[in-house]
Image (cartoon, rainbow, N blue to C red):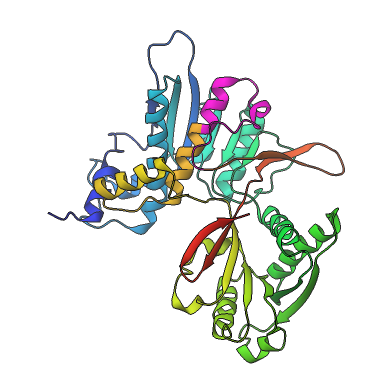
Amino acid sequence: MQRNKNNSRLLFYSILVPVVFSLFPISSRAQTDSAARPISIAVFAPLYLDSAFDASGNYRYGKTFPKYLNAGLEFYEGIQLAIDSLEKENIEADIHIYDTRSAKKMNELVQDGELQDMDLFIGYVNVNEAALLARAAATMQIPFVNINLPNDAGVKANPNYIILNPTLGTHCTAIYKFLQKNHALSPIIYFRKKGPADDRLKTYFTDAEKATASVPLKMRYITLEDTATTEQLRKFLDSTKTNICIAGSLDLNFGLALARQMSALGKSYKTTLIGMPTWDQVDLAKSAYRGVEIIYSSSVYINNDNQLVQQLHNHFKTKYFSRTADIIFSGFETLYYFTHLLDANVDSLSKNFGVKKNTIFGEIDIQPVVNKQTGGTEYYENKKLYFIRKADGVVKAVN
């Protein structure tokens, strides 16, 4: 008998609800009965339990499951899977889960001293929460791992702040190096539109050009209107060779329109189009993008040939009738990786950042971001990026 996907997800969600969850966190112990103090980690996630359940613990939305609940729940699912794995490995850790959408506000939680004894913060956060937790991390000298926000949140001179999702500047530098490695001698056309956001994006590429120790790329910058036609594009392309182009805009609609227009020109013009990291959320296997090789940078690449990946896919398909979202893998990887680093040296986490043996689904390469004037560490950032190639429905990672 087929079960309803929403009901399966709702059943899992209801497991999270203790009677007074709005005031207290969930605490999960990876290993008990130890004489030594276990590692203590605070995990922050937007679970929305106060809005989804009433004071009696009754779910407010009947048989429906609003989409806004998904991200926090999927993150929690990954965290719980990591807790199970750590328990099997006898790693001693207390994991405290805090609902960032609880009635108890984040600033109250920080101020009342409840977090003072933690060894690590891990957060699926927005920009205000990232800034708040980063300040708390600096004051309490507790490392804070921002798992999702590719943004420094205005944080400076704080070596306790760790950005796991690489920033836009890091993506642009990596794209520049990727092109140097694979298309060093090719003329490259950089299509953009007018506006301050695209001006900033272009600056990242020109900064990478100034900083390179290799021969700079042959980059030509072209500013298009929002509705550039195939005929307008045609005059910039060469029908005798593969055209290497960059969709240099944070406007997703602009970039995808560019891809569709190049697809329409595909029979006469062979094109490789480099997209932005925001393209990860788009189904580029659609026929509208056929005939164009599309490559973009991503902080996550889930290799479906990985045995554990296959097991997780099967687990969520059979138990919850849903796909395994990327944030599930990220939640699992983050808690598992950093708990192992703390287990190796709880007093000096940063000394173990180079350890990669405990990553499961990919790689993590955490490096200090250094202030060029002072030489001090502004924060730490994961510099590992993948390049995803999508061409005619086939998806794979490329170097």
Q: Tell whether 346 sits left or right of 101.
A: right
Could you tell me if residue 29 is visible in this image?
Answer: no
**Residue at 46% over, 41% down:** 331
Q: Is residue 356 left or right of residue 187?
A: left
**Residue 350 falls inside the magenta stretch:** yes
Task: Name the foreground residue: 55 vs 146.
Answer: 146
x, y percent for residue 116: 55, 24
> Along the line of sight, which residue is nearer the eye, 113 or 46?
46
x, y (%) of residue 5?
Answer: 24, 55
Numbered marks: total: 0
Instruction: Answer left or right for 155 relative to 327.
Output: right
**What percent of the width, then of the height, locates residue 317?**
29, 50
Quick one: 33 or 245, which is closer to the camera?
Answer: 245
Q: Is residue 104 left or right of residue 338?
A: left
Where does the magenta region start and end? 337-361
Q: Quadrant of the N terminus?
A: bottom left
Above/below status of 92 relative to 128: above
Residue 176 visible, this angle:
yes
Question: In the image, what residue occupies the spot 63% across and 20% down?
Answer: 347
Magenta span contains residue 270: no
Residue 269 position within the rendered picture, expressed as x and y whole percent measured from the top left: 63, 83
Q: Against 186, is 16 above or below?
A: above
The residue positioned farthest toward the bottom in the image shown: 231
Q: Residue furthest left?
A: 1
Question: Which residue: 56% across, 79% down?
Answer: 257
Instruction: Note whether 35 is above or below 375 in the view shown.
Output: above
For the C terminus, which image quadrant? bottom right
Residue furthest to the top in view is 35
Q: Is residue 171 above or below residue 161?
A: below
